[in-house]
């Protein structure tokens, strides 16, 4: 209970710090001039987006035999969103955070849970690419060269990141090579922590990689899971765009 209250207090402090950083007077001015009808609709869209995200991820988790209640998955998603919002890059820590919430106290499912997170992020690329192509066509018709350049660069970066992620996910040799380098770095940074337990930790990581690869391959072959989660993804991005639309109304 004390730990939970501490986390709530930390969250409140972070929110207050963000308001102070943005400007208290400016924030109050914006709140006063807000159209509450559109704000309510934006909040509703955000709630739908979070629930849809939790439902989509739970499909992956169930397929990977990681049985969790919807409420637990929903909490994990909310924790991930919070961490994303306070870390650089908006995606830096949210994925490990929600993976930790679901896997906490269950070491044997870390690899499978990580695979579901990876599948969740990879699937997001499909609606992103669809909407990017729509925006690209719109910018092409209007001959807006700056937007065309930005869309082209962002698409190439997305494809590059996706390609590298898939390469390391499905190639066991590359994954183990990356693991070896990571462990070497950790041993240099924390030599006392690894003293006497190096082999045990290495075996644990290797077992996690094997579980991760097997789960990700199984998920990629299941057509029912693919189409169900794709539907959730498309709906998720539609409500997120509606949320943005209502915010700027």
Image (cartoon, grey):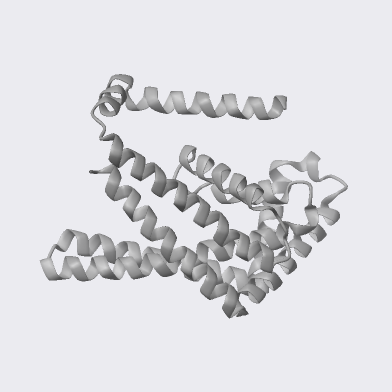
Residue at point 27%, 63% (across, down): 151
In this rendering, position of residue 75 left or right of residue 243: right
In the rendered image, the vertical position of residue 206 relative to residue 32, given as above or below: below
State how many labels appear: 0
Residue 74 visible (yes or no): yes
Q: Position of residue 25 (x, y in %)?
A: 28, 19
Q: Position of residue 29 (x, y in %)?
A: 25, 24
The residue lying furthest to the top in this view is 25
Q: Identify which residue, 219 or 161, lies in the foreground.
A: 219
In the rendered image, the vertical position of residue 46 relative to residue 169, given as above or below: above
The residue lying furthest to the front in this view is 37
Q: Identify which residue, 50 or 26, lies in the foreground.
A: 50
The residue lying furthest to the right in this view is 196
Q: Quadrant of the N terminus?
A: top right
In this rendering, position of residue 221 left or right of residue 85: right
Residue 159 visible (yes or no): no
Splitting the image into 4 quarters, where does residue 234 fall? bottom left
Residue at point 41%, 45% (across, down): 44
In this rendering, position of residue 234 left or right of residue 190: left
Q: Quadrant of the C terminus?
A: top left
Residue at point 68%, 64% (across, down): 62
Q: Position of residue 124 (x, y in %)?
A: 46, 64
Residue at point 73%, 59% (across, down): 67
Q: Position of residue 11 (x, y in %)?
A: 54, 29
């Amino acid at each position: 209970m004390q730990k939970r209250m501490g986390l709530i207090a930390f969250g409140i402090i972070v929110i207050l710090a963000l308001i102070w950083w943005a400007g208290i007077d400016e924030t109050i001015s914006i709140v006063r001039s807000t159209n509450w009808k559109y704000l309510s609709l934006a909040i509703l869209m955000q709630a739908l987006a979070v629930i849809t995200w939790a439902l989509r991820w739970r499909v992956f988790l169930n397929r990977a035999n990681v049985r969790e209640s919807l409420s637990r998955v929903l909490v994990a998603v909310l924790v991930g969103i919070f961490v994303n919002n306070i870390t650089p890059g908006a995606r830096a820590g949210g994925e490990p955070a929600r993976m930790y919430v679901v896997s906490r106290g269950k070491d044997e499912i870390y690899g499978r849970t990580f695979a579901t997170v990876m599948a969740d992020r990879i699937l997001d690329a499909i609606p992103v690419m669809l909407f990017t192509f729509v925006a690209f066509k719109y910018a092409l018709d209007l001959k807006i060269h700056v937007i065309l350049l930005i869309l082209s660069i962002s698409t190439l970066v997305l494809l590059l990141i996706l390609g590298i992620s898939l390469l390391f996910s499905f190639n066991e040799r590359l994954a183990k090579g990356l693991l070896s380098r990571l462990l070497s770095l950790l041993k240099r940074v924390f030599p006392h922590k690894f003293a006497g337990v190096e082999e045990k930790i290495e075996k644990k990581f290797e077992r996690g990689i094997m579980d991760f690869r097997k789960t990700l391959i199984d998920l990629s072959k299941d057509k029912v899971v693919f189409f169900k989660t794709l539907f959730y993804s498309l709906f998720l991005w539609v409500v997120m765009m509606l949320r943005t639309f209502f915010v700027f109304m």
